[in-house]
Amino acid sequence: MDEIRLYKSPWKAITLMLLCLPFVVIGIFIISREPFWSTNYMMGWVSTLFFGLGILIGIVQLLDKKPQIVINESGLWDRSTKRRVIPWDQIEGAYLISLNGQKFISLELDESFEVKVKQYKWATWLNKAIGAQKVNLHLGQLKIDEKLLTEFIATMAISDSAQRKELLNDLPNGHFAKIVPINSK
């Protein structure tokens, strides 16, 4: 079965680490120059620890080799949904939303779909207020063309099984981004 696997972009992790590195260096410089327990000494530690955590997160993201999203004939799997696969027959549509520069694909799902993680009432209200759905695929760590992926998911949702197989087979390697391989199993 052909499938598309979308992975985190290593460049986003490297960018995070490079943005945090100067603040860690400045924090270490301040710690080494200021008197013990002075305000500047403490601020140096705060800077070093906070931005050092950013470097640690970047390293973890860089070493993470698990796919974030997998698309195949039977459905769509997103790592954050805490589910195995969302079947295509439960997906009624998909659209792209942007919140503070972060891109999401909102999946319109039928009533038979049950979310594993129970949302609070305020979270459900907030999702409706911003135009999101129960399930939203976060694309922040992926280096892809969001519009093409959204159109592809919407097309797969309205296609039958034979058309889905054909769509997956006809999709050129690297259609969404250079890091998207199509694997045959």
Image (cartoon, helix red, strand yellow):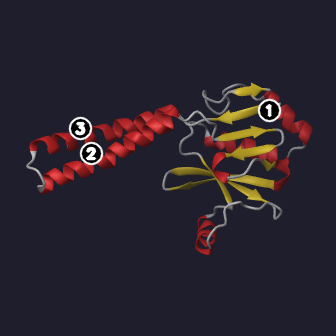
Q: Quadrant of the C terminus?
A: top right
- Going by the numbered disc 3, the residue's amino acid type is Val
Could you tell me which secondary element the residue under label 1 belongs to?
helix
- Going by the numbered disc 2, the residue's amino acid type is Thr
Q: Distance from label 3 to label 1 (Cα)? A: 47 Å
Q: Which-is-in-front pick, marks 3 and 1?
A: 3
Disc 1 or 2, which lies upstream in sequence? Answer: 2
Q: Position of residue 51 (x, y in %)?
A: 32, 45
Q: Position of residue 83 (x, y in %)?
A: 72, 51
Q: Check disc 2: other Cα within 10 Å, few if <14, some if 14-19, many if 20+.
A: many
Q: Check disc 3: other Cα within 10 Å, few if <14, some if 14-19, many if 20+.
A: some
Q: Is residue 52 above or below residue 178?
A: below
Q: Which residue is mark 2?
A: 48
Q: Distance from label 2 to label 3 (Cα)? A: 7 Å
Disc 2 or 3, which lies upstream in sequence? Answer: 3
Q: Distance from label 1 to label 2 (Cα)? A: 47 Å
Q: Position of residue 49 (x, y in %)?
A: 30, 47
Disc on res. 168: 1
Q: Which residue is mark 3?
A: 25
